[in-house]
């Protein structure tokens, strides 16, 4: 390895914001980033650029031109290529000594290996992936791994932190095995966006269940990465940060001019009890 690519050189500009001891600690840490698209690609790159020494990535999808507007791995040169392959090459070009493992998505068959030895789970799965997500959060809780998910919504984003000792993923989103996939996705959407800050300028978030699409912007995806990566760095370095685990939820929207902390004490079950409209009316 050439000296100019040594860890001391690559991360030298971080010293002052973090200490040499903290930089060495980050080298020993491993994060899991399921999803390599709109937010996962930049989650992974940002955390690797901030000194995390190990990463596990997972995605089965390929890039297409419909991804150009928001997915930073999507270019005319990567159309048709697997997102995880493109991200792997990108990350190793930033830190050639990076410890990296790649998976073809997260499933019941792979979730154990995917989360083994991981210090932090940064959820970046597509919104419409729910069953593998539930399994992943169950395994993370079993292994004592903290998880964070940031969702880009409109011109803003949200942050949810699931600590192994806090309300679980299924409890917060009120998910039960007897529910249909659509019912679970509706609850997931309600719990991600309890305050609807986007309604200051947009009636609904353009979430289309039939086409499995949601309107999104590159700036909001980058904001979600800022939330996730800053929070993750603080957790890995054992630094205190004001973000509390669920049922506390954090939402920011620059177009609405708001940053809010809200306590959703009873999770989605409580939200449902407090609205007069049916949940389906919240979505397109």
Image (cartoon, helix red, strand yellow):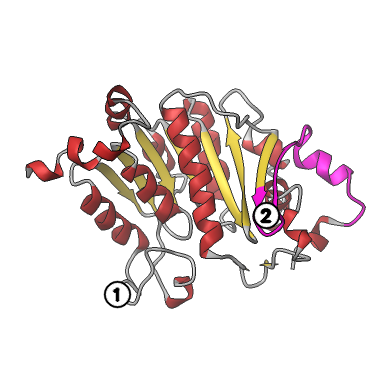
> Residue 1 versus residue 247: which sits nearer the camera?
1
Local crowd at mark 1 within 10 Å, few (<14), some, or many (≥20)?
Answer: few
- Separation of residues labelled 1 and 2 (CA atoms): 33 Å
Which residue is painted at 43% across and 34% down in the image? Answer: 233
N-term mark: 1 or 2: 1
Q: Element at badge 2?
A: helix
| Residue beneath disc 1 | 77
Q: Is residue 26 above or below residue 67?
A: above
Placement of the N terminus among the 4 image quadrants: top left
Placement of the C terminus among the 4 image quadrants: bottom right
Q: Does residue 31 appear anywhere in the picture? A: yes
Percent position of residue 80, x then y: 34, 73
Q: Is residue 167 above or below residue 205?
A: above
Q: Residue furthest left?
A: 2
Which residues lie in the magenta part?
252-277
Q: Does residue 1 appear anywhere in the picture? A: no
In the image, which is nearer the foreground, mark 1 or mark 2? 1
| Residue beneath disc 2 | 185
Using residue 239 as the reference point, say whether residue 199 is left or right of it.
right
Percent position of residue 267, x then y: 75, 37
Q: Element at badge 1?
A: loop
> Residue 81 versus residue 182: which sits nearer the camera?
81
Reply yes or no: does residue 281 show up in magenta.
no
């Amino acid at each position: 390895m050439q000296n100019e690519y040594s860890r001391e050189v690559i991360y030298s500009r971080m010293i002052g914001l973090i200490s040499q001891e903290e930089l060495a600690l980050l080298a020993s840490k491993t994060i899991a980033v399921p999803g390599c698209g709109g937010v996962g690609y930049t989650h992974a790159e940002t955390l690797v650029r901030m000194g995390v020494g190990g990463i596990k990535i997972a995605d089965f999808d390929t890039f297409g031109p419909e991804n150009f507007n928001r997915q930073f791995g999507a270019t005319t040169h990567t159309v048709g290529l697997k997102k995880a392959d493109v991200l792997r090459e990108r990350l190793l070009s930033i830190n050639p000594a990076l410890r990296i493992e790649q998976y073809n998505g997260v499933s019941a068959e792979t979730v154990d290996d995917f989360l083994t030895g991981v210090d932090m789970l940064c959820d970046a799965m597509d919104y419409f992936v729910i069953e593998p997500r539930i399994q992943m959060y169950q395994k993370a809780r079993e292994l004592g791994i903290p998880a964070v998910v940031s969702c880009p919504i409109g011109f803003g984003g949200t942050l949810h932190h699931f600590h192994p000792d806090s309300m679980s993923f299924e409890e917060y989103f009120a998910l039960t095995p007897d529910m249909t996939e659509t019912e679970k996705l509706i609850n997931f959407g309600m719990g991600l966006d309890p305050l609807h800050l986007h309604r200051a300028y947009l009636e609904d978030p353009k979430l289309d269940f039939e086409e499995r699409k949601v309107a999104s912007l590159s700036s909001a995806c980058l904001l979600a990465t800022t939330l996730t990566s800053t929070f993750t760095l603080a957790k890995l370095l054992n630094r205190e940060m004001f973000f509390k685990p669920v049922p506390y939820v954090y939402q920011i929207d620059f177009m609405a001019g708001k940053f809010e902390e809200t306590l959703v004490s009873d999770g989605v079950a409580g939200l449902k009890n407090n609205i007069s409209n049916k949940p389906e009316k919240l979505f397109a």
